Image (cartoon, coloured by chain):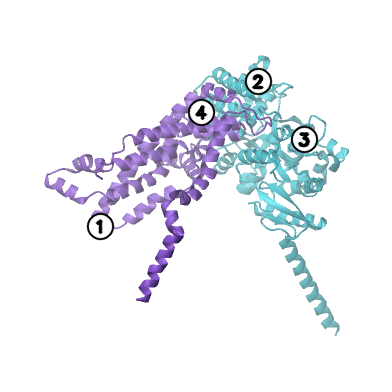
Amino acid sequence: MMRLRLVTALLASAAAFVAVSAHADNLVTKDRVGPADAPKSFTLRLTNDGPTSTDPVWAEGYQKLFSEFIQRHPGWRIDLERMSDNIGQEQARMLEQAKSGNGPDCAAVDSFVLALFKGANVLKPLDEYFTKEEVADLFPFIREGITGPDGKIYAWWWNTDLRVLYRNKEIVPDAPKDWAELKAAALASKEKGGEGVLFNGGRWEGTTFDWLANFWAQGGKLVDDKGKPIFAEGENREKFLKAVNYFKDLVDSGAAPKRVATIVNYDEFNAAAAAGTAALFIGGNWQYGQLKNTLEPEEFAKWTFSEIPGPTADQRSTGTGGWTFGAFSNDPAKVAMCAAVVKEIYAGPGNALQQQLPTAAALYGKYDVFKTEANETFAKALVNGQARPGVPIYPEISNQIQIMMGDVLSGTKTPEAALDAANTAVQAAFARL
Amino acid sequence: MPTTTAAAMGAAQRRVAGPSLARRIEANPFTWLVPVAVMLGVFYLYPILDVFRLGLTNASLVGSDERYTIVTLQAMFENPALLDILKTTAVFTIASVVGQQAFGLAIALLVMRGERRKLKGMVALRTLVLVAWVIPGIANGLIWQMLFSEAPFGAINSVLRMMHVSPVAWLSDPNIAMLSAVISNVWRGTAFSMIVFYAALKAIDPTLYEAASVDGAGHLQKLRFITLPQLRAAILVNSILVTIQTLNTFDAIISLTGGGPGRATEVLSLFTFNTVFRNYDLAGGSVLSVLMLVISLVLALFYASFMPRREVSE
């Protein structure tokens, strides 16, 4: 009799577990989180960072996080929308939708275009959902990025990234500290059969962003306090040309291959590392994990990273980006849910799941994954982090820098002529803003 | 004859009541053209008119105070980059149109010849060519990017190295990058031309070739004096379609070169896309769209002026 009871209890437990599991599974579908008949709902537009991620580990992790979230918020349903990989176009479209009142209630906004969303007055303040301590714990450039001219915060920047110099220790044992050392190391690596140093030089945002570290390291400024482009004026012009000539010299001297003018994807560096043709490249911090997954353990052990060399050893800078969440809804309850999604799913658990750098100092101590030597080094390098200026003219500045870089690296124009052409185009665009 | 009487009465009643609905619709084509006109108006005409309107404003995806102005028009036409972009567009379009038609005609002739000789595999050949046509532009660009890659492991350059030929700067040299963009576009668009020419070749009366053979004409003479004149209408129609299609091509270029290096492969459609989606300049993009429309119309009218006219007796 006792045995029968035990078996019955076990079967009941198993059935209950299966039922709960099935219930949890049903809570997260391709386009919905929560029961289909929930009385309240809001739309959430995501990138690849979510339950429908193409990365199975991330997808599973987010499905669990979202499932737990919706069970803590009964009566709600999240209608999921997914952006394509064409982020620039997606963000532009979303801005237009938000302006006409047809945007999602809550969405992932690229930090690179956050200023445009703030300037268009489509984002709702999130101050009441975050404590002053939480805001104060954010890195300064993050805090500055999400704060509007009225002092309120209009988004929550939950992850960040930075650029570093990767190197194969077997070929380049010591970290180059300045431009001259990098050139010498690249040329030395060529003698060992490598391609030299690789970096983005094609027509895309990565080219501008990665190169700007060399301009910023000298103290160069793209725009003044009012957002007017000043990169081609006075001292900035000299610094700008110095940074352009540095890249030109790398290509002309053979320290970098001419093909850098065609590189429009960080994955090219992973491919070159896997093929054993590259010993040096300027890439993103997220590539460390990618290299670990791509290379054989003994090959991966040869790779390390260091800060991007500056003109001198004490002049360093690195571009920092990342993703934010913003609320577009006029319904305060939906804005509150948007803030809850960020706090409970992304800022912390999401960072740990994707191993993407948190934006608040406290989170580095909270999760073991950020206590690794690599992540601690990345966090230290964030001290020299510099975000792109949050001004409406930045996209055109970036576009012109990409064109200029192509013209200079392919030898079509001199750096001076390319800079003048870029400045003329940017000033004309600025006059029309 | 009661049946005949009833039928006659019914006809008389219909005459009294007026023509039937079907007859009325038939007599008045406007009625059945309305749905098509509404569809075209809503989905084609209205967007075109709105683009014209936006071109006369300062509309942007960022700003909010939209007002009417000719400043955008002025700024777009005074843009120093526009002339270079138009030249690039002209080179890309002419090379693509010529290339696609030449290869399309060559493959169509090959297929026709193969079919005449009852060779096996002609259907497979046609299908194989069509595969390129159904590949999306973005994928086409990515495929050719891998082939043209200048990395030591790039596909075409690796083959060249194996043949002891120096690798080519397919994408980093501004002049060769344009050639690469044209090759990728011709590869994709050739199938369309092949279909058009294949259909037109099928319609040529075989007795013309028989008569020419009797007269002792060679292959080249038959091509010059029979095939090409008989294909004139098909070539012109195809030219219009391929030109418009090529002028609108930006997806393959954006994934192949992004328009670079510099602006070496930035065609008008890509410039328009960048203006709207990267610079958020809706008004500027609208002006450029109107410019593209005008260029397409002018070229279409130009080609159409060479179309063979139908005889009055026909």
**Residue A400 in view in this figure:** yes
> CA separation, marks 1 and 3?
71 Å
**In which quarter of the view is residue B123 placed?**
bottom left
Instruction: Decide which of tag 3 and tag 2 comes sooner along the chain.
Output: 3
Return the residue at label 2: A231
Q: Secondary structure at mark 1?
A: loop
Q: Which chain is in purple here? A: B
Give amino acid for label 1. Lys
Q: Secondary structure at mark 2?
A: loop
Give amino acid for label 3. Ile
Category of crowding for the residue at label 2, using alpha-carbon neighbours closer than 10 angstroms: few (below 14), some (14–19), many (at least 20): many
Which mark, residue A101? none
Q: Is residue A383 left or right of residue A243?
A: right
Return the residue at label 1: B118
Give amino acid for label 4. Arg
Q: Position of residue B19 (x, y in %)?
A: 43, 58
Look at 49% across and 23% down and name the residue there. A412
- Drawing shade for chain A: cyan
> CA separation, marks 3 and 2?
24 Å
Return the residue at label 4: B263
> Callout 3: residue from which chain?
A
Foreground residue, B218 or B159? B218
Report if the CB atoms under discs 1 and 2 are less than 8 Å apart: no
Q: Is residue B81 left or right of residue A315?
A: left
Instruction: Decide which of tag 4 and tag 1 comes sooner along the chain.
Output: 1
> CA separation, marks 4 and 3?
34 Å
> Callout 2: residue from which chain?
A
Which mark, residue A146? 3
